[in-house]
Amino acid sequence: MKFKQILISGFLLWLFSVIGTALVAFTQQQTVERIAANEKAVLLKNLNTLLPAEKLDNDIAQDTIELQPSPLLGSKNTALAYRARKNGEPVAVVFNAIAADGYNGAIHLLIGVYDDATLAGVRVVKHNETPGLGDGIETRKSDWILGFNNKSLKNPEPEKWKVKRDGGDFDQMTGATITPRAIVKAVKNTLLYFEQNRERLYQ
Ligand SMILES: Cc1cc2nc3c(=O)[nH]c(=O)nc-3n(C[C@H](O)[C@H](O)[C@H](O)COP(=O)(O)O)c2cc1C
């Protein structure tokens, strides 16, 4: 009798652990898929706001190139870049770049560069900057980041790619200079990367 009870308890214990493990695995898989889907949706939205639809006719999210780690892109791992084309001709490259020296660490950016080396625009995709101080880099908080539109290494000239506090052309934010300084540097470096690697980016 006692032996039977032990057997039943053992079986129930095993059953619950199997069900528990299956539930955790299932939830984790669902979460991973949902996060990936959300990230893809955010990426597409950002790509669409960076490049007007009439400028390209390819599926930019699928037309990618894997770039080797580069200090100019702030990347320690390979990073994807997205290519926009029209009638097969190069239109723009959108880089994943990282401004490593934000106030609270890395700021992840999408930086669109037209084939004539002018900026289509810049968007922040991930950051930990302080709400109310550094988070004015988000388009839903302020227009600051739109100030990069159409800029290039000729406009302003390279020495002016700094915040005004450092003698450059770019506004800082009230009480927050570190965040804009990091982004201005990252955007300038991405333009340098484009200049140095332009030929092979569309291959
Ligand atoms: C709690 C705290 C959080 C801060 N967060 C940021 C931030 O996210 N970005 C930033 O540029 N400065 C931030 N600052 C301010 C910086 O320490 C620094 O004072 C400022 O960037 C310099 O800008 P200013 O010379 O215009 O004052 C923060 C300061 C404190 C005390």
Image (cartoon, rainbow, N blue to C red):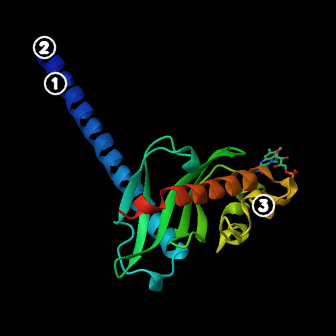
- Residue under the image location 54 percent in, 67 percent down: 112
Where disc 3 sits, the SS reads: helix
Q: CA distance from mark 1 to mark 2?
A: 9 Å
- Say whether residue 169 is visible: yes
Q: Amino acid at mark 1?
A: Ile
Q: Is residue 42 left or right of residue 143?
A: left
Provide residue 100's location: percent of width, then percent of height.
63, 44
Residue position for label 1:
8
Q: Is disc 1 in contact with disc 2, using a CB cutoff of under 8 Å?
A: no
Q: Nearer the viewer, residue 80 or 139?
A: 80
Query: On screen, 21 above or below 44?
Result: above
Q: Residue at x 43, y 62 (%)?
A: 199
Determine the secondary structure under disc 2: helix
| Extreme-bottom residue of the structure | 54
Mark 2 vs ligand 1: CB below 8 Å: no
Q: Amino acid at mark 3?
A: Lys
Q: Mark 2 and mark 3: span between their CA atoms? A: 83 Å
Residue 102 horizontal/vertical position (percent): 69, 47
The answer to which quarter of the image holds residue 163 is bottom right
Q: Is residue 140 visible?
A: no
The three-letter amino acid code for the residue at tag 2 is Phe
Residue placed under numbered mark 2 in the picture: 3
In the shown orientation, is residue 103 left or right of residue 189?
Answer: right
In the drawing, does residue 132 fall left or right of residue 106? Answer: right
Estimate the x, y position of residue 84 in percent, counting from the top left.
42, 72
- Which of labels 3 and 1 is toward the front? 3
Task: Identify the image quadrant of the C terminus.
Answer: bottom left
Q: Residues within 10 Å of mark 1 (few under 14, many from 20)?
A: few
Question: Which quadrant of the rendered structure holds the N terminus?
Answer: top left
Q: Nearer the viewer, residue 135 or 60?
A: 60
Q: Quadrant of residue 28?
A: top left
Q: Which mark is residue 160?
A: 3
